[in-house]
Image: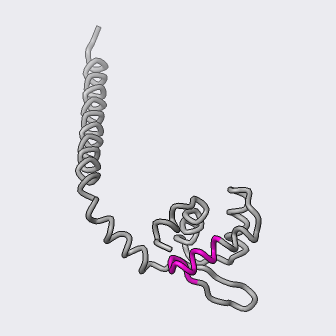
Amino acid sequence: MHAFDVLGDPVRRRILELLADGELTSGSIGAVVQQEFGITQPAVSQHLKVLRDSGLATVRPAGTRRLYAVNSEPLAELDAWLDRFRRFWTPHLEALATELARGRRERRLGEAAQTEKGQTERGKTP
């Protein structure tokens, strides 16, 4: 199964989001996903299996528990594939960053002008 097919499912994306913060037990993953998506434990197990089989997640035994983690290699391959398309959104994001910076600068200048005006008015005698 192609990585984009695997990531097309919101449950599997959520599981990877949870794993992005570090290893989790299957029980911990199941508790969150069952609550958020209203699915059964066997359904969560099936999603974990798909993530393992696709290589996006790894599992290791730790006593009686199974610890899941993100496998970064397939994600790096996805990132490399997406690199061809970054030109479509990168200029827009850079323009947005410029506009946000301009807005912050104008707000600071406006606040400074208001402060200066207030100080000047307080210094006047009636």
> Residue 69 at x, y = what percent?
56, 79
Residue farthest to the top? 126
Position of 35 with respect to 86 (left or right) is right
Q: Which residue is at 52% across, 78% downward?
A: 54
Residue at horizontal 38%, vertical 70%? 78
Quadrant (top left/top right/bottom left/bottom right) for the C terminus? top left
Q: How is the image coloured?
A: one colour
Residue 49: say if magenta: yes
Q: Relative to 104, is 75 on the left or the right?
A: right
- In the displayed structure, 109 sits above or below 30; it is above
Q: Residue at x 51, y 65 (%)?
A: 7
- Residue lying at the far front of the rendered structure: 1
Q: Residue at x 26, y 54 (%)?
A: 90
All told, the count of numbered labels is 0
Using the image, determine if residue 123 lies above or below residue 107. Answer: above
- Which residue is nearer to you in this view: 63 or 87? 87
- Classified by dominant secondary structure, the portion drawn in magenta counts as helix
Toward which corner of the image does residue 9 lie, by quadrant?
bottom right
Along the horizontal axis of the image, is 24 left or right of 116?
A: right
The reply, left or right, for residue 114 in relation to residue 71 is left
Q: Which residues are magenta?
A: 47-58
Q: Position of residue 86 (x, y in %)?
A: 28, 59
Q: Quadrant of residue 84?
A: bottom left
Instruction: Pinpoint residue 25: horizontal percent, then vertical percent.
Output: 68, 78
Q: In the rendering, at what x and y percent does residue 35 appear?
A: 73, 58
Quadrant hosting residue 76: bottom left
